[in-house]
Image (tube, rainbow, N blue to C red):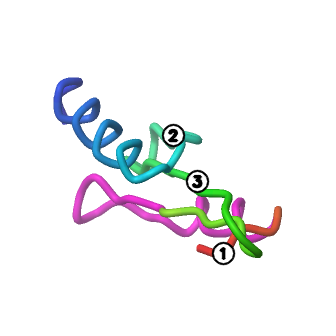
Amino acid sequence: MAPSELNEIKRIYQSYGFSFAKQYDNDDVLVFTLKTGYFDNADIVALTDSASTDRAFADYSEIGFAC
């Protein structure tokens, strides 16, 4: 994915109050977090059809995020 496309995805998420948390380079996965209310939320975004979100899901679930 082109850097301009990645920046656009990040811009859109940030416009909804999310913070960019991490990019899993090997898995083509982005993670955005939103900390409001009772739950800390993590939105995991697969950039390709073949991207595996398993590692990101496990990492963020382990530290208490609702994914």
Q: Are marks 1 and 2 in contact (CB under 8 Å)?
A: no
Q: Earlier in the sequence, mark 3 or mark 1?
A: 3
Position of 60 with respect to 47 (left or right) is right
Q: Point out the image quarter for the C terminus.
A: bottom right
Identify whether 17 is placed above or below 21: below
Looking at the rendered structure, the kind of residue marked 1 is Ala
Is residue 12 toward the left or the right of residue 32 in the image? left
Front residue (pair 53, 36)? 36
Q: Give the magenta-colored segment's residue range.
A: 44-62
Residue 66, which numbered label? 1
Q: Reply yes or no: does residue 1 show up in magenta.
A: no
Q: Is residue 46 above or below residue 12?
A: below
Quadrant of the rendering where the N terminus is positioned: top left
Q: Secondary structure at mark 2?
A: strand
Q: CA distance from mark 1 to mark 2?
A: 16 Å
Q: Label 3, on which residue?
A: 33
Q: Amino acid at mark 3?
A: Thr
Residue at label 2?
Answer: 20
Question: Residue 37 location, x and y as percent?
Answer: 71, 70
- Residue sitting at the far front: 37
Query: Magenta stretch: residue 49 in it?
Result: yes
Secondary-structure class at tag 1: loop
